[in-house]
Amino acid sequence: MILYELLPYDALRLIWWLLLGVLLIGFALTDGFDMGVGALLPFVGKTDVERRIVINTVGPVWEGNQVWFILGGGAIFAAWPPLYAVSFSGFYLAMFAVLAALILRPVAFKYRSKRESVIWRNSWDWALFVGGAVPALIFGVAVGNVLQGVPFELTPDLFSRYEGSYYGKFLGLLNPFALLTGVVSFAMLTTHGAAWLSLKAEGVVAERARSIGVVTGLMTITGFAVSGLWLLLVIEGYALTGDIVTDGPSNPLYSEVQRTSTWLSAYVARPWIIIAPLLGFAGMTMAVLGLRKGREVSTLLWSKLGIFGAISTVGLTMFPFILPSSLHPNSSLTVWDSSSSHQTLFIMLVVTVIFMPLILAYTAWVYKVLWGKVTEADVTGNSDTVY
């Protein structure tokens, strides 16, 4: 027996769907509060020292947190090449905007304190705002469009064709439902950033963060509920029909897909997945209560649980679909027909089993070493070593 045949092809596909979710959730849980802190920076820091305190709460960890984004992109490229090809070509301008914002952020971190000019530092502070707010918003907009279906079609040789120009596609992303999910994403990560500042900052900075976090947390809960109702009443879903082959070749055109009345029919077929939105609501509700009462560690943990629940809700609701096509439903990409080869998935899993524990252990060690609040004395007394 060939070694990679120890695990069936369909099991490996399911494992890598789960691992992709782990990487995306890991990115949201770690770099999510970095983006939230950036979005909060101009509003919770009124003086230069206050803003430096805010920046230095994430200064030691933001680069490591961003690795999760790279891992997620690499996993999509290697494990789900059709998804990588179709999504990156179709969302070209949106991806460019995200990457530009993520590039702007490290530049702002490095250059912000190089000069003492007020105009110079204020400009870079707003650059940090853009670097946090834009990705948080666009990631949510992307999720809203995926739930509605993306207007692409696969040719017989599996090249993707999109409807309209890049400019038109970019404007088409900004539809009402996608803007709602974008606002939910932005509010959710801003709340996460507020929970982080509540833990890592003190005094007036932490108080302002808590006040804003309560508002954005309530926005997240409300928006999450409205999005669910919108999915129930307006947005059509997708379903595989006919004989479903879970271990066949990776060719989406071999599958038969039809539109359904709603995505939420998944909760009838798999009632247990209701746990995901319940965790989303519970986590964010407890995070809001924690911010109101000034709790620190528990608030951040509840915020993480809320994000976990919200992202899991999308993945479990859509399963087995990864990228549905509104233009040609049979071109939709699913877990069972959009992966790399059996051997590739097995080799990647072996590498992941070896290196993922090392990454998690190192990350935990870094956070342990850097535990504690950032104070005014830390930033004023160490100007040569902190941001």
Image (cartoon, helix red, strand yellow):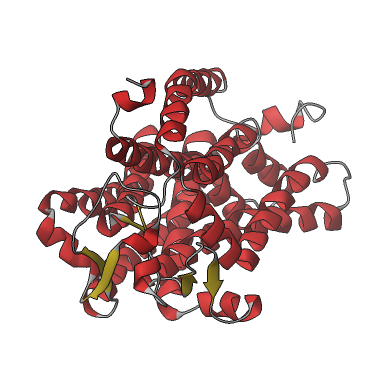
In the rendered image, which quarter is residue 64 located in? top right
Rendered location of residue 220, percent (x, y)? 37, 61
* Observer-nearest of 345 and 15: 345
Rendered location of residue 144, percent (x, y)? 41, 68
* Observer-nearest of 287 and 102: 102
Res 115 visible: yes
In the rendered image, which quarter is residue 253 located in? bottom left
Rendered location of residue 145, percent (x, y)? 44, 70
Q: How many marks?
A: 0
Res 206 visible: no
Rendered location of residue 328, percent (x, y)? 39, 75
Q: Quadrant of the N terminus?
A: top left
* Observer-nearest of 288 and 248: 248
Relative to residue 63, is residue 383 drawn left or right?
A: right
Residue under the point 60% across and 54% down: 132
Q: Is residue 362 above or below residue 134?
A: above
Q: Quadrant of the C terminus?
A: top right
Q: Is residue 259 above or below residue 203?
A: below
Relative to residue 261, is residue 93 drawn left or right?
A: right
Q: Is residue 177 above or below residue 28?
A: below
Relative to residue 296, is residue 85 drawn left or right?
A: right
Relative to residue 22, is residue 271 drawn left or right?
A: left
Residue under the point 30% across and 41% down: 14
